[in-house]
Image (cartoon, rainbow, N blue to C red):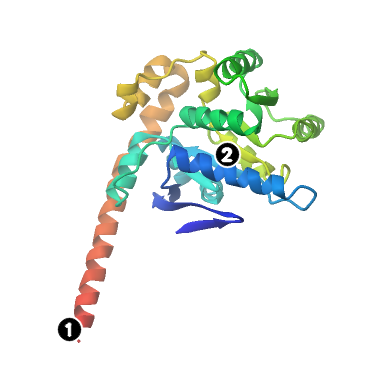
């Protein structure tokens, strides 16, 4: 079913283990964001819509959502939830979306930054370490000289105090961004975007995970062939075993049997519907 938003419909979604993943592409996400921003700018001086937010959803995110209904609710409320990992792409294809491709957070960030540079959209960066943000901004401006970086903030690795939260909100409002790219890992970034959708009306927030570290050169990305073949997890596990071993050894492997069970369940429902239709025609 297509989610309806003012001025433009969001891409349709397909349920994958209880999480509705958008059947979309880089171009469609970019065009949708541009339409949302144009709509916001046309509404200058009037009450704006709550911020839209986009989740780039990995197998890890889906499995966390299975354990935690609050995360599942946030992902399902997202205006767009892109298939960020190849196993999700394969799942969508197995459910009938044969042409589905990966919409990977770091690449989506570059796509949106390229469009922002052309269209004069203002970008705010939230997340990463201070030194990472400095290099990231320099790299983005080198790649997109016309890009308007309205501001950046590196939050501490703890909960912000009420005073700090108010200061950050004021900083972002004064920066007047069209986009806020959020890079503070899953599920923290999804919770942050959901909690701030009414705080920054008219803005498009995009949770891009490790994209800040990748584009700042702090963390290496997996080779393209590993990404295409669903082996990025192995590359990241060997690169950061201490941080990621629980995710890739204890959590994400459960995706495969749950996906298989959903596929069997769908096949059984389809067969039952076929029998019911046949019986009805026989009557």
Give residue 112's position: percent from left, percent from top.
54, 32
Residue drawn at x 30%, y 51% as measured from the top left:
95
The image position of residue 91, as x and y in percent, is: 32, 44
**Among all residues in the image, which is located at the extreme left?**
282
SS of the residue at dot 2?
helix
Residue at the spot of label 1 = 282
Q: Position of residue 157 (x, y in %)?
A: 65, 23
Label 1 secondary element: helix
Q: Are marks 1 and 2 in contact (CB under 8 Å)?
A: no
Label 1 to label 2: alpha-carbon separation: 51 Å
* Residue at image coords 36%, 19%: 235
Instruction: Look at mark 2 in the image and give the residue it sits on.
Output: 190
- How crowded is the residue under tag 2: few (<14 C-alpha within 10 Å), some, or many (20+)? many
- Answer with the quarter of the image where residue 89 lies: top left
- At a point 31% along the width and 52% down the height, the residue shown is 262
Q: Is residue 193 visible to the viewer in this orientation of the structure?
A: yes
Q: Quadrant of the N terminus?
A: bottom left
Disc assigned to residue 114: none
Between 87 and 2, the residue placed more toward the observer is 2
- Front residue of 203 and 157: 203
Examine the rendering and report whether any part of residue 183 can be seen.
no
Q: Answer left or right for 141 relative to 86.
A: right
- Residue furthest out toward the front: 118
In the displayed structure, does residue 2 sit left or right of residue 74?
left
Q: Is residue 242 above or below residue 201?
A: above
**Image quadrant occupied by the C terminus:** bottom left
x then y, percent, for residue 16: 39, 49
């Amino acid at each position: 079913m297509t989610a309806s938003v003012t001025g433009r419909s969001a891409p349709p979604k397909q349920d994958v283990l209880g999480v509705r993943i958008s059947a979309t592409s880089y171009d469609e996400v970019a065009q949708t964001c541009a339409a949302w921003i144009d709509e916001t700018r046309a509404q200058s001086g009037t009450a704006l819509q709550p911020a839209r937010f986009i989740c780039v959803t990995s197998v890890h995110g889906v499995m966390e959502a299975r354990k935690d209904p609050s995360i599942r609710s946030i992902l399902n409320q997202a205006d767009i939830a892109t298939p960020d990992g190849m196993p999700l792409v394969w799942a969508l294809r197995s459910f009938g979306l044969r042409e589905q491709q990966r919409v990977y957070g770091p690449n989506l960030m570059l796509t949106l930054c390229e469009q922002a540079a052309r269209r004069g959209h203002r970008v705010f960066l939230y997340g990463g370490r201070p030194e990472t943000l400095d290099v990231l901004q320099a790299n983005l401006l080198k790649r997109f000289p016309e890009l308007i970086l309205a501001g950046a903030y590196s939050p501490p690795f703890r909960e912000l105090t009420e005073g700090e939260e108010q200061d950050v909100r004021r900083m972002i409002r004064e920066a007047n961004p069209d986009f806020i790219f959020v890079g503070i890992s899953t599920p923290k970034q999804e919770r942050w975007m959901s909690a701030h959708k009414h705080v920054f009306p008219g803005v498009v927030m995009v949770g891009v995970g490790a994209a800040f570290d990748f584009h700042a050169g702090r963390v290496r990305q997996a080779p393209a062939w590993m990404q295409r073949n669903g082996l990025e997890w192995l590359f990241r596990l060997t690169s950061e075993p201490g941080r990621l071993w629980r995710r890739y050894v204890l959590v994400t492997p459960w995706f495969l049997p749950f996906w298989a069970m959903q596929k069997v369940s769908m096949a059984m429902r389809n067969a039952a519907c076929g029998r019911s239709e046949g019986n009805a025609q026989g009557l």
